[in-house]
Amino acid sequence: MVCPRCKSENFKKNGSYTSKSHRQKLVQRYYCRDCESTFSDQTGTLTCGERKPYATQLVMRLLMSGVSQRRCAKIADLHPITVARKLERLGLRAAARNLEESTLDSIEEVIFDEMETFEHTKCKPVSIPLAVEKQSRRIIAIGVASMPAKGKLAKISGAKYGARDDDRKEALAHVLECVKNAAPGIKVIKSDMCPRYPNIVKKTFGGQIKHITYKGRRGCIVGQGELKRGGFDTLFSLNHTCAMVRDNLKRLSRRTWCTTKKRGCLKWMLDLYVWCHNQLLLGADWGMALA
């Protein structure tokens, strides 16, 4: 343990206090001799300053198990605003942990692609670029980007909401940059035949790795378009992971009335899911590890 303010180890015990929010738990307090500040065992933890810290683990497990925020509030007997605030704190903590534990020299083969969802209405589509390690299905990086509507909705979207920014290129470039930093030993990267991908890959990696593309295939009914029907799927690790994301996050499920209202909240949810997904693959208790 170190002082959270000056990172010094020159501190001493400074009494204790009983935390009502932590159900009468006795919390040790400390005094730093260098910067003369005080802190406690709760300083810097996930539940520091929360009035209902005992519900944080339950909220996290419900949100990552296909439960909407409003239903989570009813199950946990919390106000919906409390659940939203806990989601923000959990998402920010998960994003920081994902960056800390993202570097793996053993990664040699990565698959990337984009999912699509929407915010508020289908006239406001959103792209979700993500990269997955082929062998372990570990999610290396994920992002969120706005995109213009396509097909019959393009005219309706333009007339009702105006021109919509297309941030897919920047978001995918950021995801691939994270892959480059997390996997310095990468040799092969795979994707489908989207015409935008080769230039972005070449610009990010500079032609140092091999980019293999595969023709897209029709989805099967069970996988809701993510898992492909019939035969061997060369991009199975990615498609299976995308199917898991849609199944475990209620707002991403197909044909649901639970939709994203803000892209920032969607990013918190995705960062939290990436943490839980990777920890479950490692066989760890992702709830307690995040705390």
Image (spheres, rainbow, N blue to C red):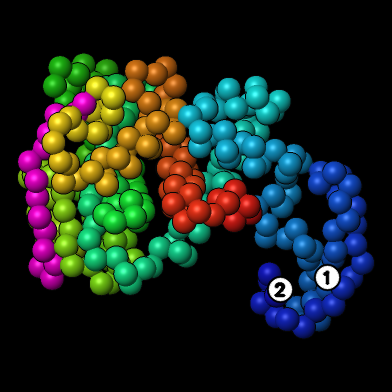
Looking at the image, tell me whether mark 1 or mark 2 is earlier in sequence order: 2
- Which amino acid type corresponds to the residue marked 2 in the rendered image? Met
For image coordinates 19% across by 45% down, the residue present is 235
For image coordinates 32% across by 28% down, the residue present is 118
- Find residue 223 and report its horizontal and vertical position in percent: 28, 29
User: Looking at the rendering, in which quadrant would you find the N terminus?
Assistant: bottom right
The residue beneath circle 2 is 1
The residue beneath circle 1 is 30
Question: For mark 2, does the 10 Å Cα neighbourhood hold few (<14), some (14 to 19), or many (20 or more) residues?
Answer: few
Verify whether residue 218 appears in magenta. Answer: yes
Tell me the quarter of the picture where residue 119 sits. Answer: top left
Q: Vertically, is 289 above or below 262? A: below
- Which amino acid type corresponds to the residue marked 1 in the rendered image? Tyr
Q: Vertically, is 239 above or below 99? A: above
Answer left or right for 241 relative to 69: left
Q: Are marks 1 and 2 in contact (CB under 8 Å)?
A: yes
Question: For mark 1, does the 10 Å Cα neighbourhood hold few (<14), some (14 to 19), or many (20 or more) residues?
Answer: some
Q: Secondary structure at mark 2?
A: loop
Q: Secondary structure at mark 1?
A: strand
- Find residue 228 and report its horizontal and vertical position in percent: 19, 33
Tell me the quarter of the picture where residue 263 sits. Answer: top left
Extent of the magenta region: 207-220
Magenta part mainly helix, strand or loop? Answer: loop
Verify whether residue 119 appears in magenta. Answer: no
Q: Is residue 135 visible?
A: yes
Q: Is residue 127 visible?
A: no
- Find residue 90 and report its horizontal and vertical position in percent: 57, 46
